[in-house]
Amino acid sequence: MERFSRTEKLIGIENLEKLHASKAVLFGAGAVGSFAAEALVRSGIGELTIVDFDKICESNINRQLYALESTIGKYKTEVAIERLSDINPGIKLTGIRRFADAGSIPEILSEPPNIVLDAIDSVGPKIELLAYAAANGIRIVSSMGAARRHDPLSVRVGDLFETEKCPLARLMRKALRKRGITSGITCVYSDELPDRPERGLIDEDLTASGHTQKVLGSMPTVTGIFGLLLADTAIKILTA
């Protein structure tokens, strides 16, 4: 297929066929997840399910691929599938508008994919997803905190239990150790210390679900790198 000819020249036909035959599930279609989805589809993933409960709002425009003046108020999964289908009409795409939690995650992953990508913002759902994947032997790549960082060159890939300077990763490790999980989760993280949280930290109601989210400063130059590295790591695992 011509649209993947340059990918084939770089990684070879066998690895491209592995991607065509792979299914990925992405949790979160925001600042990190939208870039991860884009990279997966442009690289030739055969099947992608996107899980996100939220709608696009104006404050998303500074960092999310799907956030445009024309898409404000639409569900992220709806906009994502329309855009990604236009990139590759041959891909199998599924959008699931559900909040990821202990009840929904087992249902969503009842047919285990080849890999899961975690771009969830909220701590509780993130813990549940990582714990479920680890307990069920599902390969997963997880994004740690991308907000409150300035330096895209500080973004790294490594084992969650060996990261430093990331408060979210520290919370994840503590929670997962209580569940007997002590290694084996690959993550994208920054070794830059986060900016001061007192700069405008507020709570905002999420209109699609009634859940609240802490609003933190962020730049597309950093969140985008997180998403691209999330996809790149997934692709390398799938073609290993």
Image: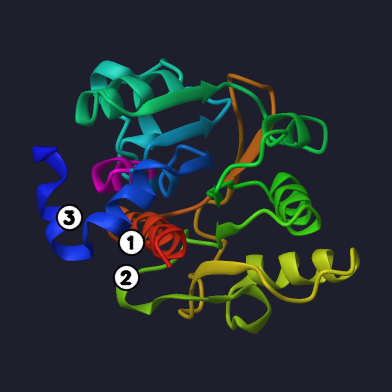
Helix, strand or loop under label 3: helix
Residue at the spot x=33%, y=29% of the render? 91
Residue type beneath disc 1: Ile
Q: Residue at x 39, y 58 (%)?
A: 235
- Local crowd size for mark 2, using a 10 Å CA cut-off: few (<14), some (14–19), many (≥20): some
Disc 1 and disc 2 in contact, CB within 8 angstroms: yes
Q: Is residue 203 above or below residue 165?
A: above
Inspect the image, locate mark 2, and give the three-letter code of the amino acid beneath it. Answer: Pro
Magenta region, main secondary structure: helix
Q: What is the quadrant of residue 183 in the picture?
A: bottom right
Q: Amino acid at mark 3?
A: Glu
Question: 16 or 87: nearer the eye?
Answer: 16
Q: State the mark number for residue 8.
A: 3
Up-down relation of residue 123 to residue 113 (above or below): below
Q: Which residue is farthest front?
A: 14
Q: Which residues are magenta?
A: 37-44
In this figure, which residue is indicated by the disc labeled 1? 225
The label number, if any, that marks residue 152 in the structure image: 2
